[in-house]
Amino acid sequence: GAVVSQHPSWVICKSGTSVKIECRSLDFQATTMFWYRQFPKQSLMLMATSNEGSKATYEQGVEKDKFLINHASLTLSTLTVTSAHPEDSSFYICSARVLWGTGVDSPLHFGNGTRLTVT
Amino acid sequence: DQQVKQNSPSLSVQEGRISILNCDYTNSMFDYFLWYKKYPAEGPTFLISISSIKDKNEDGRFTVFLNKSAKHLSLHIVPSQPGDSAVYFCAATDTGKLIFGQGTTLQVKP
């Protein structure tokens, strides 16, 4: 089946530094990838939709200057958390969809997530 | 505004019995529903889905039921196994963007 690889799986950084998270579709091309965030015991919240070759679409309340998304190729999207603060500590998950035909009829495939801890 | 709700944060079931996880939604425009399973520190894994034109979809031990008039869907796992212990998220979409419920932690006791 379709595989989405996310790296790193966990990272600890100091407040004020930036962290880059990579999301790769390993055996399919993904023109669209999604970035989610999950706080403990809460649901996954969509942060942004990453489109290959164009600007990402951010959800309301998500700072685009803080969470930089780059979708440089059909198999790679990156999320950079800039000037990280402790409140950015969370579980970040990317996902991508294999397009079977009309689009919505294929499930999202998720990476294994990145646990970010900002000290 | 929580468009997708899983009102039971946890569920405990004996091995071999049926597990029923419930999910309610408010947006009548949703036309596709999915269930994901998630282990700690891992990304969600797709389990099963259902289109709004159906009321039931079955895949092995997993069956999803959709009641559009009640805006309710449920996931049945029969028979439940200890390896099914995880957090289960329901999700819904009408645009391709998934809206997730809060999740239900299922514990299957041997």
Image (cartoon, grey):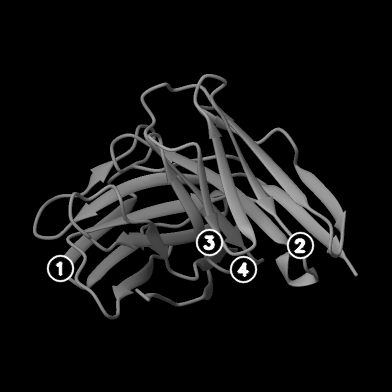
Task: Answer few, some or many: residues within 10 Å of disc 1's Cα (few below 14, many 20 plus, some between 14 and 19).
Answer: some
Q: Which residue is mark 1?
A: A72
Amino acid tagged 3: Pro
Alpha-carbon span between mark 2 and mark 4: 26 Å
Q: Residue furthest bottom?
A: A26
Query: Which residue was labeled with disc 3?
Result: B44
Both on one chain, marks 3 and 1?
Answer: no
Query: Under tag 1, what secondary structure?
Result: strand
Residue on which disc 2 sits: B79
Between label 3 and label 4, give the one nearer the viewer.
3
Is there a contact, CB below 8 Å, between mark 2 and mark 4?
A: no
Instruction: Specify the quadrant of the image occupied by residue A26.
Output: bottom left
Gap in angstroms between the C-alphas marked 3 and 2: 22 Å
Write down the chain letter for disc 3: B
Amino acid under disc 1: Ala
Left or right: where A60 falls relative to B33: left
Q: Which residue is at the far left?
A: A53
Seen at 26% across and 63% down, the residue is A98
- Chain letter behind tag 1: A
Q: Residue drawn 90% across and 70% down?
A: B110
Q: Which secondary structure, mark 2? A: loop
In the image, residue A53 lies at what x, y percent? 9, 59
Residue designated by label 4: B41
Mark 4 closeness class: few <14, some 14–19, many ≥20 residues within 10 Å: few
